[in-house]
Amino acid sequence: MPRRVSLPAADDLFRPTARAEEAAAAPRAEPEDDQDGRKKPSGRVRHDEKMTVYITSDELLDLEHARLVLRRSHGLAVDRGRVVREAVALVLADFEARGDESALVRRLTEE
């Protein structure tokens, strides 16, 4: 007797997990401003958006090394995503504060 497996329909796979009213009413985990008026990184919350970034093997090793040093030397058990979000927040804050003199503009114009 052949076995037939029933698979869920596309509507079942791609359905929203919360009703629209609940999603609209739920507070979003947005970065808040710190005491200096700068945005804080989102930290350890559920993130609604995803972005894929391609990096070299050396960059990945450097990121992983930084994560391990943070854990060993500073007692901070953070994942790579948290390190990247913190780094992005620092770069964007510097860019907002310094504009043309920021490290971001300086590095991007070196290419």
Image: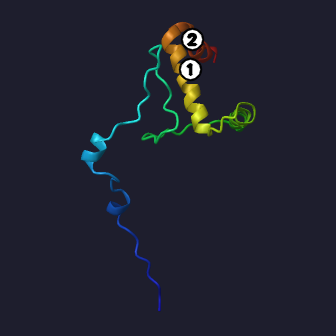
Q: Earlier in the sequence, mark 2 or mark 1?
A: 1
Q: How is the image coloured?
A: rainbow
Quarter holding the C terminus is top right
Q: State if disc 1 and disc 2 touch (CB < 8 Å).
A: yes
Residue 91's label in the rendered image is 1
Q: Quadrant of residue 71?
A: top right
Cα–Cα gap, marks 2 and 1: 8 Å
Q: Position of residue 60 (x, y in %)?
A: 68, 37
Q: At 30% across and 44% down in the image, what residue appears?
A: 23
Q: Position of residue 61 (x, y in %)?
A: 72, 37
Q: At 74% across and 33% down in the image, what residue appears?
A: 69
Q: Quadrant of residue 32?
A: top left
Estimate how packed mark 2 is, as few (under 14), some (14 to 19) or many (20 or more) residues with alpha carbons within 10 Å: some
Q: Quadrant of residue 110?
A: top right
**Amino acid type, residue under disc 1 in the picture:** Val
Which residue is at the far bottom? 1
Residue 102's label in the rendered image is 2
Q: Position of residue 100 (x, y in %)?
A: 53, 8
